[in-house]
Amino acid sequence: MPSADELLGPSSAEALARAIGTAAPGSPLPSLQAAGDGLQGLALRERADLLRDALLADIPGGYPDLARVVRAAAGSEEFTGWLIWPVTSAVAAKAVEAGQAADAAAFEDALALLAELTPRLTSEFAVRVLLRHDLDRALSVISAWTDSPDEHVRRLASEGTRPYLPWSIRVPEILARPGSTIDLLDALYRDESGYVRRSVANHLNDLSLSLLLIGRDEAALIVGTLTVADYQFLTGTHTQHSHMLRIATAHYCHAAQKIGAGHKKSRHNKALRFTLFCMNYRTFFTCLQ
């Protein structure tokens, strides 16, 4: 993987300052201008946070002021790549800060702006700030992303709501309500884009960590609920499903039967964790209730 300097180094800070300066003429941007000198020795996320704070310090006013500048900066060819990470973080932070918390318009526009920016660099980290603030309101907006013509936006619907997204903050309510994102996955698991389907697979793997709570009786029950669609999955007669998922279903059946038969759970949890969800994740949540 490229170094932090290559991804979000002084040159990125300078490009961000130029793009914002063009979008907000007359603003001196002292914090952004100085930020490049403070990146040395910082990890990637720390660099993003430093640039986010500099951007927030240099653009006074409320959320509408920041959103207006960010949308204007989008006209710059330099306004892309890793420098977008601190921008999306600033958008999310400003939308939920004190004084904006009850502003539904700011909250929903921030989600819209993150969707606009995600083709330039994923907004998956920033969207979690909004999910933490109001999960149900955020999900009501995000659900519409599954119909977007842009694969980056559709992927954001799955990736941004993952329970255990790497490098990101946790969303406690998603962990407490593991079925809250299932409708998104239902809409996306057969997406035409492999980029989106891989995100769905990773999301399902995150969800499957909860399988550690399931005992042998529940596993046996799940084996007994296989549908015709599951059988088609396993035999490969359902042509719309990928080879990977057919193999996953085979592992799922084998592992679940082993656990149901009384074999040591530790030998088969790894296979169960992901593969259970490939076809029968709704049954799993029924078992948990």
Image (cartoon, helix red, strand yellow):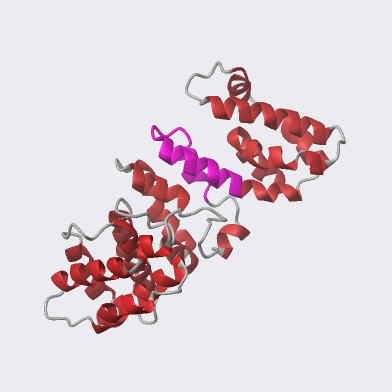
Q: Residue 21: where, in percent of width, then height?
A: 17, 73
* Left or right for 134, reference 100: right
Does residue 114 lie above or below 277 as drawn? below
Residue farthest toward the left in the current orientation of the protein? 25
* Left or right for 237, reference 95: right
Count of marks placed on residues: 0
Residue 99 or residue 212, whichever sits in front: 212
Give yes or no for residue 217 being in the magenta stretch: no
**Is residue 205 visible in the rendered structure shown here?**
yes
Does residue 191 lie above or below 48 as drawn? above
Give yes or no for residue 187 being in the magenta stretch: yes
Q: Residue at x 63, y 35 (%)?
A: 280
Say which quarter of the image contains residue 154.
top left
**Is residue 61 visible in the rendered structure shown here?**
no
What span is in magenta? Answer: 181-206
Q: Main secondary structure of the magenta part?
A: helix
Q: Residue 48: where, in percent of width, then height?
A: 39, 69
Does residue 95 lie above or below 143 as drawn? below
Q: Residue at x 70, y 37 (%)?
A: 271
Say which quarter of the image contains residue 150.
top left
Residue 48 or residue 287, whichever sits in front: 48
Q: Residue 49: where, in percent of width, then height?
A: 41, 73
Say which quarter of the image contains residue 54.
bottom left
* Left or right for 57, reference 137: left
Q: Residue 11: where, in percent of width, then height?
A: 28, 67
